[in-house]
Amino acid sequence: MVQKLGGFQEIILKLQEFWGKYGCAIVQPYDTEVGAGTLHPATTLRALGPKSWKAAYVQPSRRPGDGRYGENPNRLGHYYQFQVIIKPSPPNSQELYLDSLRHIGIDTNSNDIRFVEDDWENPTIGAAGLGWEIWCNGAEVSQYTYFQQVGGIPCKPVSLELTYGLERLAMVIQGVENVYDLNWNGLEGDEKITYGDVFKKNEQQFSAYHFEHASTENLFLQFKHAEEECQKLIKVNLPLPAYDQCIKASHFFNILEARGVISVTERASYISRVRALAKATCVKWLDQELEDN
Amino acid sequence: MREFLLEILCEEIPARMQLKAQDTLAKISGDFLKQHQLDYDEIITHITPRRLVLFIPGLPTDQPTIIDERKGPKIDAPKQAIDGFLKSTNLTLDDCEKRNVGNATFLFAKIEKLGRSTADILVELITHIIKSFEWPKSMNWGSYDMRWVRPINHVLALFNNKSLDISFEDKNIECNNTTRGHRFMSSSKFTVINFTDYQLKLRDNFVIIGHQERQNIILQKANEICAENNLVLKEDLGLLKEVAGLVEWPIVLMGKIDEQFMNLPPEVLMTSMRSHQKYFSVLNKDGSMAPYFILVSHIDSPDRGKQIIEGNERVLRARLSDAQFFWETDRRKGLDEWNKNLASYIFHEKLGSTLDKVHRIEKLVNIIDPNSKAGCAAQLCKADLVTEMVGEFPELQGVMGYYYAKEMGEDEDTALAIKEHYAPAGLQDETPSKTTSITLALADKIDTLVSFWSVDIKPTGSKDPYALRRSAQGIIRLVFDNKLRLNLLDIFEKAYDLIPPSSHKKDKKEAIQELRNFMVERLKNFFKDSFDIRHIQAVLSDNWNGSIVQSETILKEFSDLMQTETGQNLMIGYRRAANIVTQSQKKGENCQGKIDESLLTQDEEKVLFHALTAAHHEIRGLLKKESPDYSEIMKVLANLRGPIDKFFDSVLVQDKDQKIQQNRLNLLSLIKDQLHMVADFSKI
């Protein structure tokens, strides 16, 4: 069997290779549930303060509300992002990003690559930036952001964040219309493993859990506990474990929302509670960073 | 004369900001050059997604020399003062002119300010542009304090064919006589000699700097492709401008929509293609949706767009599958089921849910028109807000309600009312003309205004987050365009009673009074192009009774009257009366007293008094009618002219007898009051 370029796993390997060569620390996924690669402390916390930083990693991301029981060809409750964070944002960064696309097999002379305005915002962690969504033949394959603030704190220097939507990118490269048909290992015939083989059951079961079975009372309690724990840890100057509690709270909130038990007004108040945790954590982390200097 | 060429090359500028930025650049540059006494022939600006271009021909090489005269001390002033003056002007005593001013002689210094070189000033201009440019949103990058809409990559600055030397805080930004072409289709940097050379070389390197030219190309190519296929492009100027801001070298391509999606309502297809993918819709000759779309790509690929079209078609299939899923789920559930979800859909935190609003609208519909057939439409008008489709495409509110209502077997008028009840949304938007649509549209907007006023939320200055001015404008147009005989103030009061008292933040009288004032302001604005603003002020300020149609009639009749000699004389009489009354009031006299008929001594006073009393009764009688005859009312006013003129011709207000004088002042006040029943003449 010949391994075909562009298997899902190979795209990841190629991206790691490209950014590793550039000088990024290839770190591993964070081991707590997060809604996006941005929430990995290697991005959220490291984007703060004056120190230079370069890292790249894959981050499994959970968005309970986006689950579709494995029936929608494009929506997933769990998917992968490839995340690059570079501080300060380098000159020529667009060329660098385009080179990374070429490196994973996208010919920029016969595909229509476009930088379309999309200012990114994550209200739960008080983060905002300016940038674009990147289109490849009309499909959004990456998010490109110059961080302007995190945890409500202005970023100086400014970090560049690149987020590749790995499934979407692989679908464009492989010309596949259903995410579950993606070739995972790049092999053919009996040895071929698809995205569906790996994840279809997960999508079915997690959708059922998030939409039907998650015990809301427990989750409300868990949210409260995480919130209290985070506040306590900030008081004792432990921003890193405090941050874990903050993203846990965020995840519990996401499940509660998927479960449909949070009203519009409550929603705003929960978001602002998580943001308060994120902000306090970021402030504490930054204080320590500045003391170390 | 010399030319200046500037190109700021940066990372992709958001399309929506481009046209404005082009004007801003011209304005900043023009102001700066004027301020620095530099003449020029013209200012030309261009913009593409990556470059802001400024071209100014006809500049001098230097600023003109300016002679500045400064007045110094007297020639016999203490030595210290004279030395100080000479030092500050850098002149000797002999250089100074001695001139007599009044009866003393002063020193005058003529200081020649040599003009600086234009090149130096242009360097400052570039720095000034970058510092003072106001983007709707700008950003920092790297470790720099510089701000721009996106990071700047390069600057080309040529004056008189030579490059200007500038350095920026971000040292990666070079400034010289080179630039680059299309991001993918051109590879290397090239040198530029002048503006003509610049445009030609950019074209050779696949960049068209003119925004309008790119729009023209897209439109022309799209029309060609459609014509070749016997189809018609659905024109969309907003989209055209946006798309021309997304490419430097437009390549127009056509893709196909899968047949399976053609059962979706055309609005859904168009919105889905437009809002996410920036595709133009294509129509058949008969105006129906054709299964094609036009896309504008940024690259002329070796396979003539094959991969690009296939990719876009795949994306569209995914988008339309979603839309189809929404369409089916929404219809399966049915509009009346969705309606129940409105209970948890907040209208405003102080005003409860949208379902509460719907209940109020249902009642209001019958208050506006007791025979209304809009009850069913009222009940369902907001249900589509919580459907999946409108959740994804908010701009389809109302439209989806229309389709889903028909799906449930509602009649055309009901469905149409649901669709049209948001209209008219803007000045260009058409006003609905079907009775059910009008009633529902009014009920929705009146409830919005009254409920916000009841919790004391109203527009302030430029802030109007709930678009309340637009609602008021909508009400005015609905009533005016359809010539509805409605008393809005009555309806406002009844609408206020529908809001639960627990929500009230303002009592009824005050809330309605404030809303009335607001409506009067909107009405003045509405009528300002058709009538003299002073007449509008006079008729509307204190006298608006809640009827817009009547307001227009009064305005017409009143304007006509004021154009006649009688009207003008009436005005003069009014002014004389008002002036005397005001002056007497300033002296502390009360002019509002009751008139004592026995104190009226001269015939002219008696005639005037009787005329005024008769006019009062007549006007009151006429105003009481359901639709008062305003031309009659104006005639009554006009008839007062004679008695008023005669009064002023032969009666002196001042009299030895204090009581008689007071009585006459009261009579003058009566003139004022009577005229005010129709219009506030003091506003003219």
Image (cartoon, coloured by chain):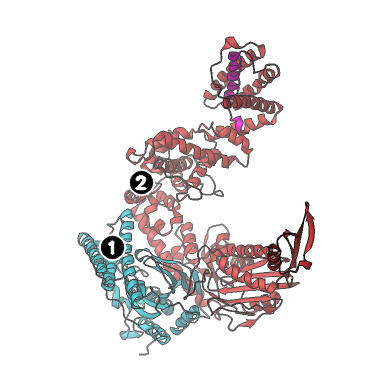
Chain colours: A cyan, B red
x and y percent of residue A5 in the render?
41, 86
Say whether residue A80 is left or right of residue B440: left
Asked if residue A34 can be seen in this view, the reply is: yes
Q: Main secondary structure of the magenta part?
A: helix
In reply to whether residue B680 is colored magenta, the answer given is yes
* Quadrant, the N terminus of chain A: bottom left
> Relative to A113, is A245 on the left or the right?
left
Q: Amino acid at mark 1?
A: Phe
Tell me where the magenta segment starts and ends, as one range. Answer: B656-682
Density class for disc 1 (Cα within 10 Å; few <14, some 14-19, many ≥20) is many
In the figure, B517 relative to A222: above or below? above
Q: Position of residue B247 (x, y in %)?
A: 56, 71
Chain letter of mark 2 equals: B
Q: Which residue is mark 1?
A: A253
Q: Is residue B254 above or below residue B644?
A: below
SS assignment at label 2: loop
Quadrant containing the C terminus of chain A is bottom left
Q: Which mark is residue B350?
A: 2
Mark 2: few, some, or many residues within 10 Å (few <14, many ≥20)? some
Q: Are marks 2 and 1 in contact (CB under 8 Å)?
A: no
The quarter of the displayed image where residue B63 is located: bottom right
Number of residue marks = 2
- Amino acid marked by disc 2: Lys
